[in-house]
Image (tube, coloured by chain):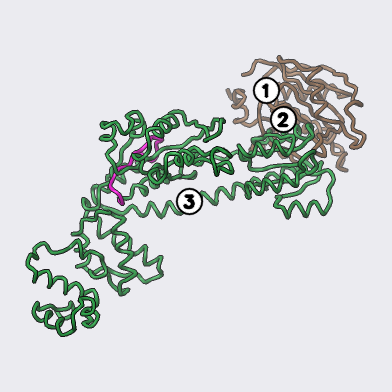
Amino acid sequence: MTKKISILIVDDEESVRDSLYSWFIEDRYHVECAENAKVALSMLESESFDIILADIKMPGMDGMEMLRRIKAMRKESIVIMMTAFATVDTAVQALKDGAFDYVTKPFDPDDLSHLIRNAAKLITLADENVVLKEKVMMLENVEDLVGKSDAMQKVLGQVESVAQSNSSVIITGESGTGKELIAKAIHSNSPRKFFPLVSVHCGALTESLLESELFGHEKGAFTGAMYNRKGRFEMADSGTIFLDEIATISTKMQIELLRVLETKRFVRVGGNKEITSDFRVICATNKDLKNMVEKGTFREDLFYRLNVVNIHIPPLRERVGDIPLLVEYFIKKYCTSMNKPPIKIDSAALRRLEEFSFPGNVRELENMVERAIVIGNGKKIQVRDLPLEKNLIDSSAESLDDHEKNHIFQILTKYDWNITRSAKALKVDRVTLYNKIRKYELKSAEDK
Amino acid sequence: MIQQQITLISFGYFRKDILEVIAEEVKHQFLLPVIFREGRLDLSEFYDPARRQYNGNRLLKQVDAEFSSDAAKTLGLFSVDLFIPILTYIFGQAALNGRTGIASLYRLSNERYGIEPDDKLLLERFTKEVIHELGHTFGLVHCINPSCVMHSSNYVEDIDQKEQHLCMPCRHKISIPDFDD
């Protein structure tokens, strides 16, 4: 899909507007005209144009003033100034004020074609740059989907088969299981991959903010709305919109969302112009939407509209077999980003991780590994580098002595068997600590 | 296929044999009957003394108002130097998806560029320009295929680079069957 370049022609002479209009329309551009700067600026408030071709001498606001205002509104706009009375001063001033080029009327047909082609090339490159950056990020994210367990392989299989379609998808799973990563994987494997994946965290926004975020708003729609703003649906045109925490949206928003999903048309907050956008919807939630439908807190029609395909990501505790792979992947990831040589994980530490319940799922494991690399000795991740103490109290230790023994051992391990620092942490003197070590026959790993 | 006819109207003197060759090629490209008329306009009304050229925008409007009908695509043939206010010259122009176009052979002859006259080449260029402008009246925009007659040409050399016919995609766009059909 190639983007159609849009051009706005601003000139007070009708014949010039008509001539340029006819010329550009034959070259497949989307063209609109304005007879003066005021009309042009008001058009630019509701619609964005890739290239603005403006006359300098116009009654009322001149082209130079309009150029400054356009640049203040949208810095990246490409504005080409035209004049029948060229002077070096105005040319220099126009370029200083941010004009892309300055041309004298009338121009050779070939010069005009070249000028517009160059501007269009710049726009295409800028767009490509954005898409490529997103693509690079996405590739990293797809790589983040690590797992050889049957459960994870099933999820990856579903991602592959659903990616090529346009169907709505609901991704369910506990917090931290990687729902957003799955959404990114679906998008980056779909035909929409060269267009944006726009994420909206519905739970983080109030109803009115979410409305403005999704649909955009017009200047003056509410206090503080100083400029027009594109909504996320508009930004996701030709791409995908990812609505995270969909279960948190209000009943009113559910109705509005249903309407947009059905028609793919909407109006900005405070506006009256209908906007069409071609997007695919992927939602995520850690709630049981079906249960919410039964309770009447989530609209049934919206649920069925969204739930064309359901992908459930199992919690990490149900795919313990993936933990070694994930640990290895996170070690590689963080050692690379911290410029450290790759390190290993102690088998005891890995065993402890496999025994851990991970209520925060993969995200918690990732944070644990990152922390261990930061605070560890730089050679091997040890049990002491992992914040598992509180969760892994030996259930067989029932007596007070057993607990004391475990606690002293953990502190000694934590301080690398440095008696002074361990005694200080335990708030006992060194002699007492030595006595306890003898009493419980505690030994460091090296002494064993 | 659009059930219409094409009317070519000559303004000023054109050799009959040249017009016949153009008409034959136009008929072959659009598969429509082509008829000829001679038109009369006081061209001095369209002359811009400052530019010493003829205003293409106004001529197009005049031909459309005086000579065109909804039943046909009409193309005015001229031999004067055409311009539009924003450009130094044009070879021709047409209303996109409209009913009227104009084309001039003034800038198509080798003599304008200090080269030996070549009547055959001039005829080829003019035929291409006529088909190109008629293509616009059928709603065709500039084609990216460099050999298609609808490819944009700003110089006569550009016209020489392209063929005299519409490419397959352009033919399909206006529902003209393939040559083999």
Pinpoint the chain carrying mark 1.
B
The answer to whether A330 is drawn above or below residue B156 in the figure is below
| Front disc: 1 or 2 | 2
The answer to whether A189 is drawn above or below residue A43 in the figure is below
For mark 2, what is the residue? B132
- Contact flag, marks 1 and 2 (Cβ < 8 Å): no
In this rendered view, identify the residue nearer to me: A357 or B96.
A357
For mark 1, what is the residue? B30
Q: Name which residue type carries label 2.
A: His
Circle 2 Cα neighbour tier, 10 Å, few/some/many (<14 / 14–19 / ≥20): many
Residue A97 falls left or right of residue A328:
right
Residue A73 falls left or right of residue A366:
right
Q: Is residue A114 visible?
A: no
Q: Which shade of the palette goes to chain A?
A: green
Quadrant location of the C terminus of chain B in the rendered image: top right
Residue occupying the point 24% across, 77% down? A415
The answer to whether A234 is drawn above or below residue A323 in the figure is above
For mark 3, what is the residue? A134
User: Is residue B135 found inside the magenta-colored segment of the image?
Assistant: no
Q: Which shade of the palette goes to chain B?
A: brown
Q: Name which residue type carries label 1.
A: Phe
Cα distance between the residues tagged 1 and 2: 11 Å
Say what secondary structure mark 1 lies in: helix
